[in-house]
Image: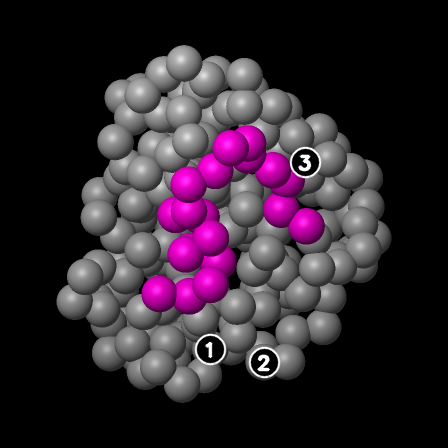
Amino acid sequence: MNTLLMTLMMTVMTYEMPKLPYANNALEPVISQQTIDYHYGKHLQTYVNNLNNLTPGTEYEGKDLISIVSSAPDGPIFNNAGQVLNHTLYFLQFSPKPVHSEPTGKLAEAIKRDFGSFENFKKEFNAAAVGLFGSGWAWLSADKDGKLHITKEANGSNPVRFGLTPLLGFDVWEHAYYLDYQNRRADHINSLWSIIDWEVVSKRLK
């Protein structure tokens, strides 16, 4: 299992903000500094704060994010833990200058095997992200046998809830794109492909 997912499964005393590996303006024009300031700096910070306030004295105190999201019932703890997990994976999958424009190695082989081609995978993933009604996430995940799946998760849910390992996630809550794209969700989705760090995503595949 890759280092990030191992870290997310460690016992914790308090939940913390992930450290961005790029400056707040580095993803422009795909994601503006204003969106990073609000989405990362305010929305995610609120989820982190909420989770730290909600878990003390409960059965989830000290548990890692993946354990909470996998087992907690719908409600405030699940919602906030899910969004901390989702956004950590989301913000760390980007790079202002990705080394590769598409997957390589084991991930590339798995995508070709399960979707026919990278272009067909993108088409199916875009359709899932654009077609999700309301707020939520589109995910590429792997099951225990290594087979890849595209899923749509409402609100703050995550594929770990169903025994899958999340590899790539697109946030389609309006706060993720409205300052830059208004109601043009499809334009936002299409633009994200240019800043995906496929080396990071590939390392999430067991």
Name the amino acid, label 2.
His
Q: Please check the rendered image and state whether residue 18 is part of the magenta-colored stretch, yes or no.
A: yes
Q: Are marks 3 and 1 in contact (CB under 8 Å)?
A: no
Crowd band around label 3 with a 10 angstrom C-alpha radius: few (<14), some (14–19), many (20+): some
Q: Residue 39 — which label?
A: 3
Q: Quick one: label 2, few (<14), some, or many (20+) residues within 10 Å?
A: few
Left or right: 6 in relation to 33: left
Residue 188, horizontal then vertical, whole percent: 61, 49
Q: Quadrant of residue 48?
A: top right
Check the picture and name the quadrant holding the N terminus: bottom left
**SS for callout 2:** loop
Return the residue at label 1.
Answer: 103
Q: Position of residue 142 (x, y in %)?
A: 28, 61
Query: In the image shown, does 187 or 58 lie closer to the viewer?
Result: 58
Q: Specify start and end residues of the magenta stretch as a single range.
A: 1-19
Q: Quadrant of residue 21?
A: bottom right
Whether 3 is among the magenta residues is yes
Colour pattern: one colour
Disc assigned to residue 5: none
Kind of residue indicated by mark 1 = Pro
Q: Percent position (x, y) of residue 8?
A: 44, 48
Instruction: Give above or below for 200 relative to 78.
Output: below
Secondary element at image label 3? helix
Pointers 2 and 1 in contact (C-beta within 8 Å): yes
The amino acid type of the residue labelled 3 equals His
Per the image, label 1 sits on a secondary structure element best described as loop
Q: Which mark is residue 100?
A: 2
Look at the picture and state if 33 lies above or below 1.
Answer: above
